[in-house]
Image: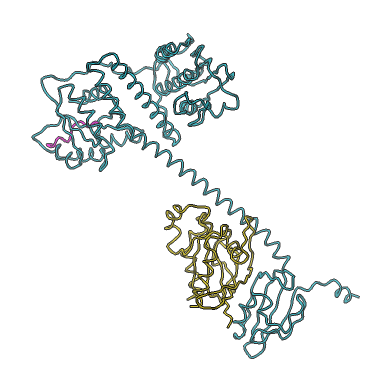
Chain colours: A cyan, B yellow
Amino acid sequence: MLEVYKKKYIKPVLQYSILDFEGNIIESDNALFLNFKNQYVGDIHPFFETITSLLTAEENETVFSCIHLNIEGKAITADIILQTFGDAKNPLLIIHDLTSHYNNYQTTAQVRNESVINSQILELKNTYLKEKEVFKNSFIANFSHELRDPLTGILTFTDILSKTNLDLKQKDYIQILNSSSNFLKKMIDDILDISKIESGNLELSIEPFYLLDLLNEIKFNYKLKAEQKGLEFSFNFDDKLPEIVGGDAKRLQQVLTNLLDNALKFTDSGSISFNASLNQLRAQKASIHFEIVDTGIGIKEENFETIFSSFSQVSNNHSYKGTGLGLAIVKYLVELTNSKISVSSNYGKGSIFSTNINFVANSTLVVNKPKNKKEIKFDVSRKYNILLVEDSEITQLSVLKILASQGHFFLDIVTKPDDVLARISNIDSEIDLVLMDIKLKEFRGDEIAKQIRKLPERHQKKVPIVAMTAKIFKEDLKRYKKAGINDVLKKPFNESQLLEIIANNLK
Amino acid sequence: MKISKKIVLLGHFGVGKSSLIRRFVENTFSEDYKVTIGVHIFKKNVTIPEKGTDVSLVIWDLEGNDDISNTRLSYLLGTHAFIYVYDVTRPATYEKLESELNFLKEKQKNTPITVVGNKEDLVTKAYIKQNSDNFGRLTDFYVSAKTGDKVDFLFSNLAESLIK
């Protein structure tokens, strides 16, 4: 009985065949495939073609695992064993059908490989995005740096030109030149700020300052601007606001002026209101609520998020000029203080931007008063020798014009590192101050400063050195100090900034 | 006389070995990735006009592996030429190229190896130029199984070199 069942239900998985040494099949049990006998094995499937060269080998068993065969319309996955005997006995070919076993393996391998490939692709995408971000930020930083030299030229010569004899029309033109170049400077500063923020290089500098003085100064400027545009301007500063707070005054000013600029830009009629109130005073911390309300074009709710993205301006109306970075900078700066910026708007009627910013507030805070801006004076009985190390012709010309207009200076301009050291080492010509560009075509100014400080005593190694640069990240300033640079003049600069820094550093 | 040559394709999984063979043998391509386990064997005749002869290429499509030393050595027996395939978009598939090739040279001395960077359709020419040092100067062809670019040329060139 058992034999009957076996014959009925058994599924053969092995086929045995005997070959001659040319690869012809002499015998086969036809358990898996019929019609094997009397065929050249290479004609059955291309797999067998490549084993015919192994038929004459010494006694040996060669196993080929997991071979996919499709013979007589039947597809199987099998292990194939070729047994040679080496004593003129005919080789034996065994086909072991392991299709279901290998199908399971296939499923497992599919899942594993897909997951490995996907994670590799994801990792690559991340690397690519990071590289792109780094490239973008360094491109922006370098590009805005390159813009500063020509901008210094424009600002300086606009300044110089404004002091010449001009008729009214020409004075108007100068006014336009001035406001255009200041607008350009603001845009470059914005772009540089965004690149600093996105590369994580922007840090707040917390120091005590007079809060109300700052708010009043902003109010004064924007009241004027609003009125020039025919808008009403109101303000409300809470009496309870602390007089002195600890925070980053420069960045607070940037947040508020960016919001006010935004309100001014998008409001053609009606009013702008600027309010500040004490939200909370607890544990030596003051939370101050700032609010800017306008009756401008408003924002659709679906755009509340996008207005804070870099380079985004929701309005398609190109009459609203700007980089679209102002609100992005506001958002980043506010978030740096662990706060949030909120917006609510009635589309077509106006918007309200508000935020609560935390400041340090306690009675021990003392403001380090900035040095009173005294009139810049030079000793008229003598002339000063200034060595300018700069290869930008525009900056050379700007410095030359500013110093020449004073009549107190001899200016010597050099562009090569050897010339700098030669001038400093020359005992016959005393140099009173070095103005040193940092990023020159052939060398770095801070490297030369280091070499100057290493000169022998008699070679004016202690000459004051003032760096002129747009690169003033924290780590840059540290590097300049370490190189022995006394002070840093930020590019672009104007006449009074240059003269002031020279006066401060002359011995 | 009929000339038959065994060509074995190796390389990491997912680099497109099966797709290259399918493009060459059937002139088809599918975006779906189906993992190869073990070996699939294909056959195609290539005519070499200058020699006035046909070569029957028996092409072994081996299971992809991230370490070539795990390859079953029986698969390599009697091989006339190897095609080592990597994916130009995935560094993991070409980072160890040199040591993988050394393994093959050690196991099958004197068997020629053609190195192929697949999926060139996914990158620009500039990308290939920039990364050519990473790919190794050993790469013979940049091909695309998807577009078919240089696939026929790869196999017919190999067939021709094998009957010289």
View extreme (left): residue: A428
Q: Is residue B76 left or right of residue A211?
A: right
| Residue A292 drawn in magenta | no
Q: Residue at x 20, y 28 (%)?
A: A400
Where residue A216 sits, quadrant-wise, is top left
Vertical arrangement, residue A466 with respect to residue A45, above or below: above
What number of labels is visible? 0
Give residue B125's position: percent from left, percent from top. Answer: 46, 54
Image quarter hosting the C terminus of chain A: top left
Give residue B139's position: percent from left, percent from top. Answer: 46, 63
View extreme (right): residue: A1
Image quarter hosting the N terminus of chain A: bottom right
Give residue A70's position: percent from left, percent from top. Answer: 70, 70
Where residue A74 sits, quadrant-wise, is bottom right
Give residue A389's position: percent from left, percent from top. Answer: 21, 35
| Residue A460 drawn in magenta | yes
Please name whichever residue, A8 or A289, is drawn nearer the observer in this view of the structure.
Answer: A8
Vertical arrangement, residue A164 with respect to residue A99, above or below: above
Q: Residue at x 38, y 30 (%)?
A: A188
Where residue A257 sits, quadrant-wise, is top left
Please name whichever residue, B69 or A234, is drawn nearer the observer in this view of the structure.
Answer: A234
Please name whichever residue, B87 or B145, is drawn nearer the observer in this view of the structure.
Answer: B145
Question: Which segment did they paint magenta?
Answer: A457-466
